[in-house]
Image (cartoon, grey):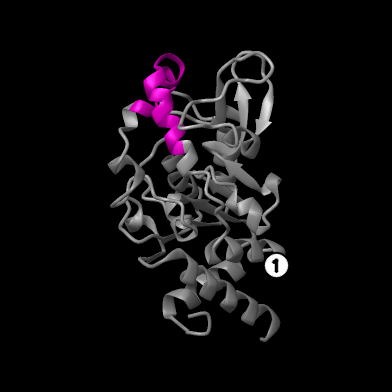
Amino acid sequence: MEHYHDPEVDKIAELILESRRLTFFTGAGISTESGIPDFRGPGGIWGRFDPEDFSIERFLNNPAARRKQWALFKELSISAQPNKAHLAIAELYNLGKLDCVITQNIDNLHQKAGVPYKRVLELHGNMQSFLCLSCGSKYPFEKVMDRVKENEPPDCEQCNGILKPDVVFFGEPLPEDILNEAMKRACTCDLMIIIGSGLTVYPASYLPAYAVDAGARLVIINLTPTPFDGQASIVVHAKAGVTMSAITFQVKDRLFYK
């Protein structure tokens, strides 16, 4: 696929080459090829877990719900590695063609692929650390998960307080500083490429609208239709890995072998 000259791939590569401020917006669909289950898709997490059990109120006040949450944390703790889509985005950064990545994901895979932390705006946090809600002690993900036994939540080693992953639960606001920076980047980009998001979770899904309203081109790479397809310059219903690999190949080909 990397060497296949698909017209849509060629057009997206041309848009990237013309762009001066390229922003990616990524959702769960970019990480399914790394083995991380989707949340809302067929066979996704919310088909097996009740989303209402994953509110901050139940996390704090309902021990049974908290055990269910920890069962999911264990499921998400697989040693996932970046796939072709993550690596292709990182390669665009190395080519000087990436301003930032705005992501709804909590899996740290953009950073593992090589995009610097300062260029990744994580709207929903990151599972790489846990915070004690009582004393503020912070623990790395691996250390906490090593102490989980049969989904029984481990307490803080310093004060026995509740440990919470550094992610946004239902009922919690998005981190204001990250959201404001993401809005700023959306309003100042000239090209936004959306990968693996159905664009139905708000307020994050307002970001493509900000980009379009500010005059940016929109490209959507997603297996299923989204509410923004009609506003996009190009829509590709295909897997993220093979599509982004082909796009990045075309970008490099035109940069170095004109």
Choose between 235 and 241: the one closer to the eye: 241
Residue 113 image point, x, y percent: 64, 58
Residue at screen point 31% across, 58% down: 224
Say if 6 sits above or below 239 in the image: below
Where residue 129 sits, quadrant-wise, is: top right
Choose between 66 and 107: the one closer to the eye: 66
Say if 68 sits above or below 114 in the image: above
Q: Residues within 10 Å of mark 1 (few under 14, many from 20)?
A: few
Q: Main secondary structure of the magenta part?
A: helix
Question: Is 137 one of the magenta-colored residues?
Answer: no
Residue 79 image point, x, y percent: 56, 52
Q: Is residue 167 left or right of residue 257?
A: left
Residue 195 visible at all: no
Residue at screen point 32% across, 57% down: 230
Say if 214 sits above or below 69 in the image: below
Q: Is residue 147 left or right of residue 202?
A: right
Choose between 195 and 38: the one closer to the eye: 38
Residue 256 image point, x, y percent: 70, 81
* Start-end of magenta stretch: 53-72
Q: Is residue 169 left or right of residue 19?
A: left
Question: Is 58 one of the magenta-colored residues?
Answer: yes
What amino acid type is highlighted by mark number 1?
A: Leu
Residue at screen point 49% across, 67% down: 241
Residue at screen point 41% across, 18% down: 63
Question: Which quarter of the figure is the C terminus placed in?
Answer: bottom right
Q: Helix, strand, or loop for circle 1?
A: loop
Question: Furthest-front residue in view?
Answer: 149
Tag 1 residue: 95
Say if 225 sits above or below 68 in the image: below
Residue 127 visible at all: yes
Where residue 145 sits, quadrant-wise, is: top right
